[in-house]
Structures are given as structure tokens and as C-alpha cells.
Amino acid sequence: MSDANIPVNEGQNGGSVTSFYPESIPPEPGHPTTANFEVVNTGDERGKGLRARVAFRRGERVARLSGVVVNRSSLDTIQISATLHMHDRWFCRLLLHSCEPNVVIDTAAMEAWAARDIQAGDHLSIDYAATEDVLGRQFACHCGSTRCRGWMTGRREGPNEEGRAWLAKNVVGHSSGRSEKR
């Protein structure tokens, strides 16, 4: 998305604040803006992600979410019901995965909340298995958490063939329900 397509609003101190959402999404208080977040390249296999520009306390609302409701999942969607997904390539798509995330998504209220204290400069992450029954693409997790599950799936699916092979090679005890990375 080019900067020309990003709405600009007046900031609290007279500076401009750019919304993450395009003009086709009606603006709402609490939508993510460049005052609170920035898109960064993580420099690793995760690619682009979001970094907080301000701190958020545990339990604080991080952002109000918006998008387009669709009936199929993709890498740009968050599952909001058994059959509906919200397409949000502007903000939610950039939330990184972590098995121990600092953000949780309330799909009923369409809000992101701080699961723990978030400092300015921290990458924002969610647990993809918390919002998705089936992932659009399973992958090896590199979140770095001591609680890392190793291979990411949706909450209602097991590892695919690639995942089973990866787990057999990289995780001790994966078939017993107890996992520990090698």
C-alpha cells in the first residue's frame, strides 16, 4: 500500500497521525495509527511485523480492529466465527506469531489487548492457534519462547506431513504430547 492511500488525521499535539486502514474503512476511535505502531522488517524468517512506539500495560486495549468480512481464510485474515474471517492486511496481517504472545485478539469486540506489559520498541505478537481453526499455511515456529510448540497449526488441526517430519527431526517427545526442542 502506498502512503498516498493511508488516511492522515490531526494528532494530539498538532502533528499528523496516519491510520493503518485505507479510506474505504470508516475511521473509528482506537484504530491503529503511526503514532502508536510502526511496520518493521524483523531481519529474520518472520519478515515484516509491527513494533509498538508507545508502551501498553497488561489488560490495556492496544487497538480497535477493522477489515472486510469474507467467508474464506487467507494469510491476511483473522477468524471471527466458524465460517467468517476478517480480511485485514493493514494491521492484523502484520502481527507476528508467538507461542507466548504479548497481544490477544477479542474477536467479539474486534479489539486487540495487551496480554502482558508491552514496552515501546517491542514487536507485537499473537498466538495464531488462538484465532484460527485451520492455518492457511503451517510453519516451523521460531518465536524463541520457552513455551514454543515448534510447529504451528490451527487449533483444530494436526501437523501436516511437513510438520510431522519437522517435529520428528527437531522435537523430543512430540508424539507423547510432551515436547522439548532438540
Image (cartoon, grey):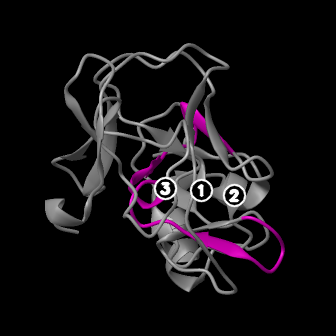
Identify which residue is drawn at 75% across, 77% down: 84
Residue positioned 41% across, 67% down in the render: 89
Q: Please determine whether, in this image, residue 167 is positioned above or below residue 177.
A: below
Q: Which amino acid does label 1 sit on?
A: Tyr
Circle 1 packing at 10 Å, graded few (<14), some (14-19), many (20+), is many
Residue 92, which numbered label?
3
Q: 133 or 30: nearer the eye?
A: 30
Q: In which quarter of the image is residue 78?
A: bottom right
- How far is disc 3 from disc 2 in space, using C-alphas? 11 Å
The segment highlighted magenta reads: 80-105
Q: Position of residue 85 (x, y in %)?
A: 67, 73
Q: Could you classify mark 3 by the number of other residues whose Cα lies within 10 Å: few (under 14), some (14-19), or many (20 or more)?
A: many
Q: Nearer the viewer, mark 1 or mark 3?
A: 3
Residue 128 numbered mark, or none: 1
Q: Is residue 123 above or below residue 157?
A: above
The residue beneath circle 2 is 131
Which secondary structure, mark 1? helix
Sequence-wise, which precedes: disc 1 or disc 3?
3
Q: State the image coordinates of residue 19 (x, y, percent, origin top left).
A: 35, 47
| Residue contact at pointers 1 and 2, CB within 8 angstroms | yes
Q: Is residue 139 above or below residue 149?
A: below
Instruction: Reply yes or no: does residue 85 show up in magenta.
Output: yes
Mark pair 1, 2: CA separation: 6 Å
Q: Find the distance from the CA under tag 1 to the CA under tag 3.
A: 11 Å
